[in-house]
């Protein structure tokens, strides 16, 4: 026998949906700002945030953390010099980009590390000690 269960979207939400909801407009960015696609991985010790930002000057990327919200913003400069001719295809983007991520658990802001290699910006965001899972051993008599 088949059982029909009424669908409720709140049942299917997971913890990472908090990241996505907070990243939507209105979030202080203008209409000319581009969203920044990110991958967020959670493990026992913290989060790993990866963003593809090829062609940027890392000195022009601003990363801040305040009130449990990580903000990444910057700008990709247009390299359009005086060109003789017309573009047939122009798909590379330029301009401002940004993303804000609110973490569902408290993180250690002083221990956040950022690296940039081969167009990938990687941030390691550790959880505070009390937010990390603790293993409790069962003792036998």
Image (cartoon, rainbow, N blue to C red):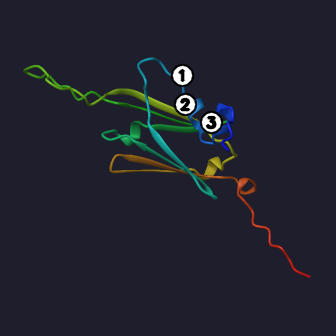
The reply to whether residue 68 is visible in this rendering is: no
* Closer mark to the observer between disc 2 and disc 3: 3
The numbered mark, 3 or 1, whose residue comes first in the sequence reads 3
Q: Residue extending furthest top?
A: 31
Q: Where is residue 100 in the image (x, y as percent from the top left)?
A: 55, 33
5 relative to 78 in the view: left or right: right
**How many discs appear?**
3
Q: Is residue 16 left or right of residue 54?
A: right
C-alpha gap between disc 2 and disc 3 = 9 Å
* Relative image position of residue 132 (x, y in whole percent): 70, 57
- First in sequence: mark 2 vs mark 3: 3
Q: How far apart are marks 3 and 1 (CA)?
A: 14 Å
Near mark 2 (Cα within 10 A), the count class, few <14, some 14-19 or many ≥20, is: some
At mark 3, the secondary structure is: helix
What secondary structure is marked by label 1? loop
Labelled pair 2, 3 in contact (Cβ < 8 Å): no
Q: Residues within 10 Å of mark 3 (few under 14, many from 20)?
A: some
For the point 47% across and 18% down, the residue is 30
Give whichever of 3, 79 is nearer the camera: 3
Which residue is tagged 1? 25
Q: Which of marks 3 and 1 is in front?
A: 3
Report the residue at 63% width, 38% height from top: 12
Residue pointed to by mark 3? 18
């Amino acid at each position: 026998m088949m059982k029909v269960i009424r669908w409720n979207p709140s049942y299917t939400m997971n913890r990472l949906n908090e990241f996505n909801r907070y990243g939507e407009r209105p979030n202080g960015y203008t209409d000319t700002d581009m969203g920044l696609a990110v991958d967020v991985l959670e493990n026992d010790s913290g989060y790993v945030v990866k963003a593809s930002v090829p062609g940027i000057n890392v000195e022009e990327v601003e990363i801040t953390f305040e009130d449990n919200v990580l903000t990444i913003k910057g700008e990709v400069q247009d390299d359009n010099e005086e060109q003789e001719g017309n573009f047939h295809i122009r798909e590379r983007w330029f301009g401002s980009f940004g993303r804000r991520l609110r973490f569902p658990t408290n993180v250690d802001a002083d221990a956040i590390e950022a690296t940039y290699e081969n167009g990938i910006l990687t941030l390691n965001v550790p959880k505070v000690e009390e937010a990390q899972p603790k293993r409790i051993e069962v003792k036998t008599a």
